[in-house]
Amino acid sequence: MNEIPLLNNRYQLLEERGKGGMAFVYHARDLMLERDVAIKVLREDYSNDPIFQERFRQEARAAANLSHPNIVTVHDFGLDQGKLFIVMEYMPGVDLKTLIQQRGRFTPDEALPLIIQACAGIGYAHRAGLVHCDVKPQNMLVMPDQRLKVTDFGIARALATIHPEEQAEVVWGSPQYFSPEQAAGMAPSPASDVYSLGVVLYEMLTGSLPFIANSATGLSQLHLEANPPLLSSMLPNVSPALEQIMDKVLSKEPSMRYRTADQLGRVLQKFGSKRVNSMPALSLTPEMQTDEYYVQPVESVADDASLDIDWISVGLGLLALLMVGGLVPFWVWVYFVYNPPMR
């Protein structure tokens, strides 16, 4: 029987759990800390590129600094036996893509708690200055208690450095889920992640992707030029407000979408018609902390984020105005002390 391979004389590979176009994923054992971990081992054609190696290290370091309940924690990364690898916390869940394939459609009450958690994790990364670049249900792990964690931050961005001089050849993310600007070979922004979150939510609600083509080029053209089928054409009883939110999220122009995942999460969390008791506790921005969804008029819910008021700044401004106004009598008195009226 062949000896089970080790990485860096520390990580014992136990079982292959999946593979994709760029990597293999293993359930492994950290022999030093005596804990289970997940290890993604990149294919040799990626691992052997020195430019990619350096960028991969930079992205892995940045991802390792993210600490959030809805983000899979990165423990370690390295190069061994000619292969790059990244070590992450081991999660006993199932990826969201598998759940979609098993279940078909999610109701809004089932889908929103999961996508809001994805927004919370990705929004935290946005506040830290990181864009995921490859948001898709395969990169979202759902635990048995319905907690969701996002994984694979920065790997797609590192891949784009292999041929940086060929902008048209740059691959930012997965064609089924990437934004129009990513399809055009442009660098993604937080609004690009928002678009991809919208595609995931669309797939959860309808059971199908908004765009289907036989090639990556065909998908790119659809993201750039076509409008997806309306939710109401597939779900006759869908809320008009939810359809309006989806239209905004899937806008071709980044400036027409919600600016960050936090904004999208805040709007989705206010949308709905009943209390969701099954939704797990989330780590959200202060503006997003609430226990209930709220029903809002159709014309206002999609633009809710643009109506947020910074009450602290307003209060400070009023205080400053009062302070300045209170000095007026003092300066009048000083003026008359030095310039007494003529008698």
Image (cartoon, helix red, strand yellow):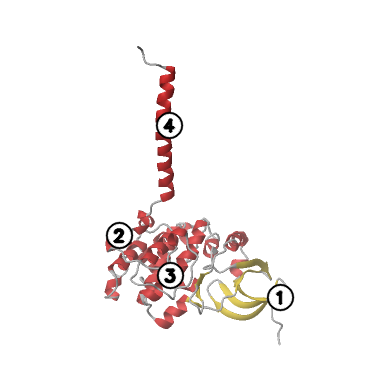
At x 27% / y 60%, what residue is drawn? Answer: 299
Q: Are marks 1 and 3 in contact (CB under 8 Å)?
A: no
Please name the residue that numbered disc 1 is placed on: 31
Q: Nearer the viewer, residue 244 or 49?
A: 244
Query: Seen in the image, is 216 located left or right of residue 234?
Result: right
Q: Residue type at mark 2?
A: Ser
Q: Quadrant of the N terminus?
A: bottom right
Q: Secondary structure at mark 2?
A: helix
Q: Residues within 10 Å of mark 3 (few under 14, many from 20)?
A: many
Q: Which residue is mark 2?
A: 300
* Marks 4 and 1, the one that precedes in the sequence: 1
Residue under the image location 66 percent in, 67 percent down: 79
Q: How far apart are labels 3 and 2 at the CA level?
A: 21 Å
User: Horizontal placement of 4 versus 111: left or right?
Assistant: right
Q: Of tags 2 and 4, which is closer to the observer?
A: 4
Q: Nearer the viewer, mark 4 or mark 1?
A: 4
- The residue mark sitting in front, 1 or 2, is 2
**Residue at mark 4:** 327
Report, in whole angstroms, how far the alpha carbon at label 3 lies from the one at label 4: 52 Å
**Residue 50 x, y percent position in the rendering:** 63, 61
From the top left corner, tell me how far across and down residue 81 is, in percent: 69, 71
Marks 4 and 1, how far apart in space? 70 Å
Which residue is pictured at 39% across the width and 59% down the height?
Answer: 258
Residue designated by label 3: 115
Whichever of callouts 3 and 2 sits on the residue coming sooner in the sequence is 3
